[in-house]
Amino acid sequence: MTTQALDILYGLSTYNSTSSLVQSVYNTRPLLSDIGRMSYALNTIGILTSIPANVTGGLIKQQDLFTKLKAAQSADEKMGVLKNMHPKLKTAFVHAILNDIVIAGAVWNWYSRSGNAMNAPTWVNVLISAVTAPILGFAVFLGGKMVFDYGVGVGFGRYRDSKEE
């Protein structure tokens, strides 16, 4: 999320119609090269940390959804399978798709900026960051919903108080 915020700040600071407004709040011009490099570095870290997160997000396999969809003969049966999914699985599926969209945008931003001077974002990079920021925010909300509402990734009953021993 910080990567997207820095890209948006860079875009607002360099776009003619908004730069004077940004400069009236805080003079970002001396920091533009640092903003670009920091955004690129954080983007790289975000991509690297998304790899183990994607590997461990295997909730869909546990529900055997794909086998049930293959076994369904008609479109109505397939829709019935999807409607009867547990809400936890629906949330996890949307969470995964949204995160994949954000990761695709991050990889594009990383690749397209690697040759730029000081890794400065172009207007396309700023636009991608502006689009993926709310998507990422909603994906984070869904991840929290899975943990706090459905207990995904929480080891209930595994904690033992040291006084019990």
Image (tube, helix red, strand yellow):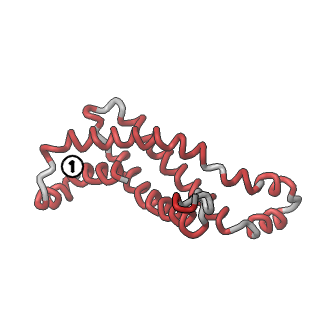
- Residue wearing tag 1: 14
- Picture quadrant of residue 131: bottom left
Give residue 71's position: percent from left, percent from top: 87, 55
Q: Quadrant location of the C terminus?
A: bottom right
Residue in view at x 34 percent, y 48 percent: 3
72 or 154, which lies in front? 154
In this rendering, the count of numbered labels is 1
| Depicted 17 relative to depicted 7: above or below | below
Give residue 44's position: percent from left, percent from top: 40, 38
Residue 117 visible, this angle? yes
Relative placement, left or right, of 17 versus 139 is left
Residue 143 visible, this angle? no
Say few, some or many: other residues with alpha carbon within 10 Å of mark 1 (under 14 / 14 to 19 / 20 or more).
some
Relative placement, left or right, of 52 versus 35 is right
| Depicted 86 relative to depicted 133: above or below | below
Question: In what element is the residue under mark 1?
Answer: helix
Give residue 84's position: percent from left, percent from top: 76, 69
**Type of amino acid under label 1:** Thr
Residue in view at x 54 percent, y 56 percent: 98
